[in-house]
Amino acid sequence: MLFFFPPGAGNPQCKVAIVMCRSASQDVSSRHGQHSMILVPMETPGVKLVRPLTVFGQDDAIHGGHFEVHFENVRVPASNILLGEGRGFEIAQGRLGPGRLHHCMRAVGAAEFALELLCRRAASRETFGKKLYQHEVVSHWIAECRLMIDQTRLLTLHAAQALDSLGGRAARRQIAMIKVSAARMACHVLDCAIQVHGGAGVSGDFPLAQMYAYVRTLRIADGPDEVHLSSIAHLELRDQLKKAKL
């Protein structure tokens, strides 16, 4: 059995993995009750770190990286199952809401820093006899980035309030909405910042390229955009049809 992209697996301080795997046959009454989360010590026979994986071609080892991990005939005590057999999906859902929200908060912070760098560059560089920010297209980028960041920040706060007051299940639409919006917003702001920096924006002289690689992964991590969009559409249609009594 192979696992791809488990974070931190290469960190020497990583001693235990939490493995989510199928622990019951498909004929279990609930499809959400087929998986369990199991504590697996990394030194257990059969656990092998196959190779480190790069992200956008960059070394991702600063926190232990992302790895390809191979499990072959790995055996651990049944007592290593967290909360009981078949509760893996339940555990994952309890963690995913706050985790997705955390990603969105970091995306807002990354976008703020990118806009700061964009404005500095636009105020210091000249083309055709005037500062970059004096070109209308660049000034519009600055304005649009500010709009998008503040809109996303408010949507993030709205999702956080819903999570606190309603709980993860009732707040899943708000969380799905911000998960899609925040990553797309940060990608757009960073793209504008890179464009204003020109070739330097994709070099190692500025952090923008690495930041873009990070925020682009957020459109995949903890559920791709497409899954969240389908969830949002399903919940919206349900509520609208209920309102219309159809």
Image (cartoon, grey):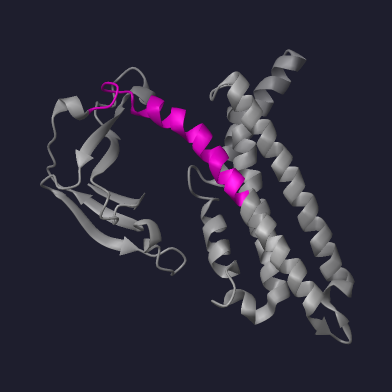
Percent coordinates x, y for residue 234 in the rendering: 61, 29
Mark count: 0
**Residue 227 visible somewhere in the drawing:** no
Residue shown at 78%/54% (left/top)?
A: 146
Q: Is residue 76 above or below residue 128?
A: above
Closest to the observer: 26 or 83? 83
> Residue at image x 60%, y 68%?
208
- Quarter of the image holding residue 172? top right
Residue 71 lies left or right of residue 191; in this view the side is left
Quadrant holding the C terminus: top right
Does residue 13 belong to the magenta stretch?
no
- Compared to residue 157, the image places residue 44 above or below, namely below
Residue 103 picture quarter: top right
* Residue closest to the eye, 220 or 91: 91
Question: Where is residue 25 drawn, in percent x and y?
Answer: 24, 26
Taking the spot 62% from the left edge, 44% from the top edge, the residue there is: 180
